Structure formats: structure tokens, C-alpha cells
Image (spheres, coloured by chain):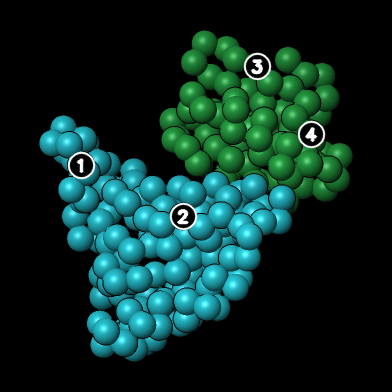
Amino acid sequence: MTTLEIAARVDAKGLSCPMPIVKTAQAMKGLASGQLLEVLATDPGSTKDLEAWSKSTGNPLVESSVEGAVFRFVLQKK
Amino acid sequence: MDDPLSIVIFSGSDDRLTAASVFAAGAAALGRPVRILLQYWGLEAFRADRAGRGSGLSEDASEAGAAALTAAIASGQVNWAETFRMSKELGEVEIHACAQSMEILKLQPGDLDPIVDGVEGIAGFLGAAGSGQVLFV
């Protein structure tokens, strides 16, 4: 669990590829540089997808964890 | 990563259109420009009077798979037209109709869904694709 303040959340649970990264990209547009976005997903490909999205777009993935069937990511707007 | 992803959509079947829409949305989310050229049955599926419905499933579909996908489409869980629309809102996604297909199928720009940006020739499409990847669906 992070102690940093989350500015926005995306609940992509139950959504299949490519919706977790589509929703992430949409939500990130509304954030200011340095703000944090939390993404929750159940899509089994989402860990690799969020890593690739972070690498391609340059927005750092600061946390990646899994609790049960739910993947949780925290990304920082570059 | 600025290499455009170019997709030729030839098929008008809902499963292939869905697969193409996933590529478009994924590339748009990654910030990659996407250019789509609609040919023949893919072009027909983008007619305004089709309202985003293709012509069933491709011959690749298995019996059980076809039932599952048909149910997902009927329930709205899968909607390729909506996924293309979302891709266009998200990033730089252009959809063009192949000029030759328009002529053969006797279609006018006004016959197409507004999601289609215009008509393009093959040289224009390949020129814009440059050395980027081209997918044929």
C-alpha cells in the first residue's frame, strides 16, 4: 500500500484487453505532472500491458502488486 | 515510439473487425499513430446503415467460440465500432476508405459512418505507412 496521495483511480476490473491501458491512457490525460493514478484490473495480461504502456509513454510505474485476483498499479504522470 | 501502425481491414466479419479494433485501441493508448485503410467487405461494414454491425463471423470461428462471441456482441460486451470510436478520441487514429473499393462498390463518402475520415488511394496509404508495420485483417 502506498502512502503517497492518489489523484485519480481507474477501476478496470472485469474488463478485458485492451481496456485497462485504454482507460489508463484516458485517465492520465486529466492529470498534472507528478500526480499519481491508481489502476485496478483483473485482466491476466494487465501486468505486462501496464509495464509496456509505462515504458512506451514514459509515465513511471511506481507500484505493481496483486491481491487475490486483482492487480493494482500506481503510475505517475511524467 | 512514433512509428505508425497501419492496418488494412479487408474483412467485414465481426470477429476480425474486433481483433483489428483491439490493435487500434492498444496502439492509440501507447501514443502510436494508427492509420486504417478500409477495403471491400471491411469498407461495407463501415456503411452508415450498418450501424457498426459486420457480416457475421469469419470462417475461422469454431462452433463453441462463435456462440460465445455472438453472445458477447449481443450483450454489448464486445462492440468493435465503439472501440474504434474510443481509439479516435484517445489518440491519433485515422480511418480512410480505399478509393478503388468505393468505386467498385458504388459507395459515396456520405454513405459511410462519420467515424471514417475520408477516401484514400493506395499510394497515400503506403506513403504514410513508411517503414512502419502494416497489418492485413
Q: Residues within 10 Å of mark 3 (few under 14, many from 20)?
A: few
Front residue of B7 and B93:
B7
First in residue order: circle 2 vs circle 1:
1
Instruction: Reply above or below: B82 against A65.
Output: below
x 56%, y 54%: residue: B133
Q: Residues within 10 Å of mark 1 (few under 14, many from 20)?
A: few
Q: Which chain is green?
A: A
Label at residue A60: 4
Chain to which mark 3 belongs: A
Q: What residue does disc 3 label?
A: A65
CA distance for labels 1 and 4: 39 Å
Q: What residue does disc 1 label?
A: B61
- Regarding mark 4 in the picture, which secondary structure is present there? loop
x 58%, y 44%: residue: A23
Q: What residue does disc 2 label?
A: B135
Q: Which chain is cyan?
A: B
Residue type (three-letter) at the residue carrying disc 4: Pro
* Residues at marks 1 and 4 touching, judged by CB atoms closer than 8 Å: no
